[in-house]
Amino acid sequence: MSLVHHRRWLSRLQNLHSQKKQILFFCTTNHNKKHTQALPPPIRVALTESAGRGVFATRRIGAGDLIHTAKPILTHPSLSVLDTVCYFCLRKIASSSSCFQDHTAVFCSEECKEKSKAFYDVERRADWSTFDEYCRSQGLKYPLLVKRLACMIISGAASADSIEILQPASLSPEMIIEMEEAFTLLRSSFKNAHILDEQMTFLNKQWYINVLARIRINAFRIELAGGSYKDLLALAAASVEAEAAVGNAIYMLPSFYNHDCDPNAHVVWIDSADARLKALCDVEEGEELRICYIDTSMARDARQTLLAQGFGFQCSCLRCSSGE
Ligand SMILES: C[S@@+](CC[C@H](N)C(=O)[O-])C[C@H]1O[C@@H](n2cnc3c(N)ncnc32)[C@H](O)[C@@H]1O
């Protein structure tokens, strides 16, 4: 990406920051005060030397401190937990008596149902069985986020360029060919549901590829840390079967954190897709905050391969450079 391109995105980000309605993404909560206040988090997004944009501390942050919280701008539950995880916030639903069932989806609260009403109404007009089955059989999770985003755009809850600010993955011609089937299924599901052409003007192949290229390197796999002992046992069992995730989500600010195999920050989810960015050690003012995109316990070569294939970069962090 060129410097001019980066500057353009940085200025867009600054504009976003100054818009009051966007404060949600950057919201921090001061629990010591009687009233909840939206304070700016102690960070800024700026250009790094070799990893594009990154997140930097604007003051000293102590080990274990909450840096900021972030609400997702897009979520989708894993297909295997559609009937036990909230459609909107990905909270686990303990029992059918404690949820708000609505046709194919479950909601943990009236609030989540209300917040997703507009795009859920669009989604439930269509028959998604073929699309979902295609994703399930191919082990694809990101097209589900594209489907959700398309429903949000059709309903007016999001704009067609809402995640354009995020960095896209570079896609090979083979990857683009692989996307065609899911795109065709997505479009035809809307068509068969009689969604009007004028509501779907954005939904062309180029839009689909652009969005998926961004989701590919910016989506977070959500594993909830909270819950009962029974949940933890279930989570441990599910982890073994690689099904621990309740879903996937896209955030704005957390997407600007770069990777390090020995990170100084991490993301935690307690009981929903609301993310908490926390410092893992003391961080000095001006220092870049980095999270780890993959399992830190892996060996160097495995980490390098995964980062190159999944995120398109060669990691040159201290740990990788020292061969650890
Ligand atoms: C989630 S984005 C992070 C923010 C990104 N730098 C930007 O400008 O929007 C992930 C991408 O950032 C770059 N990146 C992240 N960590 C990196 C690192 N340690 N070294 C080089 N590039 C990195 C890679 O291009 C990667 O695909």
Image (cartoon, rainbow, N blue to C red):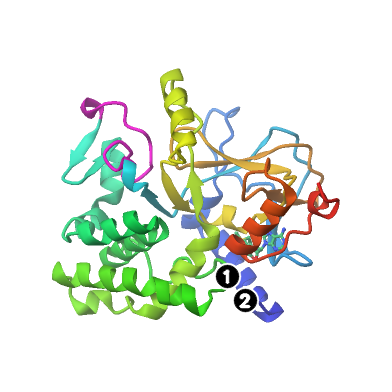
Secondary structure mostly taken by the magenta-highlighted segment of the chain: loop
Relative to 227, is 241 above or below? Answer: below
Instruction: Tell me residue 103's x, y (percent).
Output: 16, 45
Q: Quadrant of the N terminus?
A: bottom right
Q: Residue at left 49%, top 29%?
A: 236
Asked whether 148 falls inside the magenta stretch, the response is no
Query: What is the x, y in percent for residue 247?
Result: 41, 46
Which residue occupies the foreground of this view, 211 or 311? Answer: 311
The answer to whether residue 259 of the structure is visible from this angle is no
Task: Identify residue for label 1.
Answer: 12
Q: Is mark 1 within 8 Å of ligand 1?
A: no
**Residue in the picture at 83% in, 55% down:** 321
Please state if 183 lies on the left or on the right of 264 as rendered. Answer: left
Q: Amino acid at mark 2?
A: Arg
Callout 2: few (<14), some (14-19), or many (20+) C-alpha neighbours within 10 Å?
A: few
Q: Residue furthest right?
A: 322
Q: Label for residue 108? A: none
Q: Are marks 2 and 1 in contact (CB under 8 Å)?
A: yes
Residue under circle 2? 8
The foreground one among 19 and 231 is 231
Q: Report, in whole angstroms, how far the alpha carbon at label 2 lies from the one at label 1.
A: 6 Å
User: Quick check: 150 left or right of 271?
Assistant: left
Please provide the residue range marked out in magenta: 81-98
Tell me which amino acid carries mark 1. Answer: Arg
Residue 13's image quarter? bottom right
